[in-house]
Image: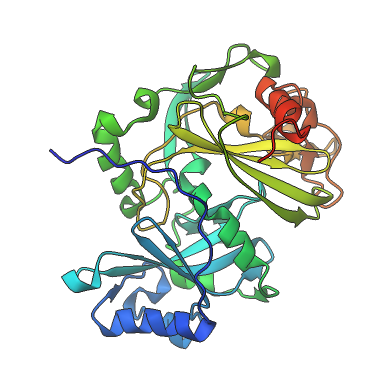
Amino acid sequence: MRPPIPTRVVPSVQPADLTPRQVAQELRQLIDSGAKLRAVGEAKHDPESLLSRGYTPKHAISLFDTRFYLTNALHNPALRFFVAYVVQGRPSTGHTEIHPRIFYKDLSLVWRCASHMIANDGDFWIGKGDVQTFVRDGYEITECVESTTDLPLEMQTALEAINRKAPPRNNKEALFLVLRNAPGSRTEPYRDFTEPRRRAGMDRRNLIHGGKSIARFTRKNDPTSLRIVPGFEPDFRKGIVETSEGRSAMYGGRLLRFRILSRNRTVQYLFMAGPEHVWIIPPQATTTELSTYGVRTVDVVADEDLFVPGYEYHYFDDDADESEHFSQIPEGFAGEPSERDSDRADASAWLNQIPVIREFRRIVLSGATRP
């Protein structure tokens, strides 16, 4: 029987101390030594054309047994992203593979790996990873589990540092070259994304809390009703692994990030704190297995309403048809629209009543605990 996936708590990684030329040479040497470059987008018939088109990596990051090579930041009207080359395997065995991927910055300010995309007939949508299907009001509904595309918390700071290295260059073709362009009806990812997750989940020893939710709200639309399974609460006094600092125009300037372990050290959280907002990125396991998409193969299940960002989608137009109204903020808690994005509203009224966020503000932001 295959052993369970190892777990490890490690400091956040940093970009390799290499020049852009050295990074590009390192990737080229892997290819020249027999590593297979596997593309799934329009570049699949000639993957090395990505390099000749200018998508040469400038930065490198290593985490566990995976090496990441990244271009400088790129952007289009909808997305800030890198072309990333995910390398797994050992060159000495002759089984090294290099997978071009798109790493992008979500509006919650977490870096993710796109699973695929839909770009047809005027539509544009980035695939949000695995899906779950359930019945609501007699209808079968399929929803994306967006956190399945979150890149490891241990490399979020490094990605943000690389993002600030150079102004992003406008680019419209990279997504088509790297990502599968799926039919408009396909929200679920392809097998190369789901299969590693399925294999990991087949062994119950890999499952966090047996695959059950570690946090839930016991009353609908009541932020004070949050219950976290004992042991899985963030350890604000002894579990702060690291802090880092950045800036966000949407959130009004300085932005602090706190990576915090659970009391039982099984999962880790990322708390984001701006001048006025605090929100939580979905927690991750401390498992060390990453897929070729660079994401963990083991999930942490929890109520998604715990992870509403400070500003979240909330589109209500009195002049529009009711069917066009859309909100990801619990009903009755949407505040004023963001000054930088009118389709997003302030979710502070919901977030500030959640007990674990109140505790974070009291213990960590008050300075009672020094990271």
Compared with 97, 108 (above or below) is above
Instruction: Name the image quarter holding the C terminus.
Output: top right
Instruction: Name the image quarter holding the N terminus.
Output: top left
Q: Is residue 94 visible?
A: no
Nearer to us in this view, 280 or 334: 280
Find residue 267 and report its horizontal and vertical position in percent: 47, 34
Find residue 312 and report its horizontal and vertical position in percent: 71, 40
- Left or right of 56 on screen, residue 346: right
What is the basis of the colouring in this image? Answer: rainbow
Kindly identify the residue that appears in the image at 53 percent across and 82 percent down: 19
Q: Is residue 362 visible?
A: yes
Find residue 260 and report its horizontal and vertical position in percent: 57, 37
Kindly identify the residue that appears in the image at 65 percent across and 68 percent down: 76
Kindly identify the residue that appears in the image at 29 percent across and 47 percent down: 195
Nearer to us in this view, 157 or 111: 157
Number of numbered markers: 0
Quarter-wise, where is residue 192 in the image? Answer: bottom left
Find residue 285 and report its horizontal and vertical position in percent: 43, 38
